[in-house]
Image: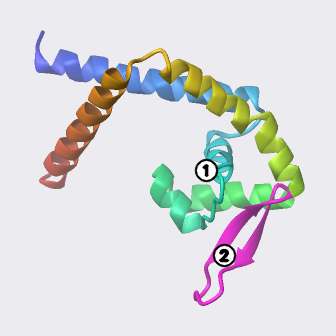
Amino acid sequence: MEIYEYIKLIEQQRKEEDSVYHSAAVKFGMSDTAMWILYVLSEPDSCVTQQDLCRQGSFPKQTVNTAISNMVKNGYVTLEPIPGSRNQKRIVLTDAGRELTEGTMCKLRMAEERAYDALTVDELETYLAMTKRLTDSLKKEISKL
């Protein structure tokens, strides 16, 4: 198989995985961005800012800002100033937000765990090492453009 065919197949897999997560967001009645924000916020002891979300999810700042604004308006999160920072605010789930994450993100995490549990530890470690190596190589080559 030629290298371009591998690239095509790998990119097709990535898009299919994105589509799987998009389907989950649709089932939950939310945008992809809102789902990923709730996903991060549902982690124990989560303390994140909009800037953190942009970095972690590789989302544009405006996209995160719009999603957070809608979540504040709907009563799922509040923004609390971080003491000692200039203007940074951490995003905090409200009671309604915690209830929403329990009905959505907890189910998503459990589905992920069941899916990933189908692989051996060696397979997971190999997958992780290979995707990291490929991503690092791709970053390097694209930085040369």
Disc 2 residue crowd, few under 14, some 14–19, many 20+, Cα 10 Å: some
Residue 134 coordinates in the image, percent (x, y): 22, 36
Disc 1 residue crowd, few under 14, some 14–19, many 20+, Cα 10 Å: some
95 displayed left or right of 12: right
- Which of 120 and 109 lies nearest the eye of the viewer? 120
Is 58 rendered above or below residue 138?
below
Residue 64 coordinates in the image, percent (x, y): 61, 57
In the rendered image, which quarter contains the N terminus? top left
Residue type indicated by callout 2: Lys
Instruction: Please report the residue visible at 65 percent of the width from the left and 87 percent of the height from the top.
Output: 83
Q: Is residue 49 magenta?
A: no
Instruction: Please report the residue visible at 52 percent of the width from the left and 63 percent of the height from the top.
Output: 52
Instruction: Please report the residue visible at 14 percent of the width from the left and 51 percent of the height from the top.
Output: 145
Q: Is residue 11 visible?
A: no
Residue 117 coordinates in the image, percent (x, y): 50, 20
144 displayed left or right of 66: left
3 displayed left or right of 99: left
Which mark is first along the chain, 2 or 1? 1
Region rendered in magenta = 76-94
Residue type indicated by callout 1: Val
* Quadrant housing residue 103: top right
- Label 1 element class: helix
Q: Given the current orientation, which residue lies at the most extreme front position?
A: 121
Identify residue for label 1.
40
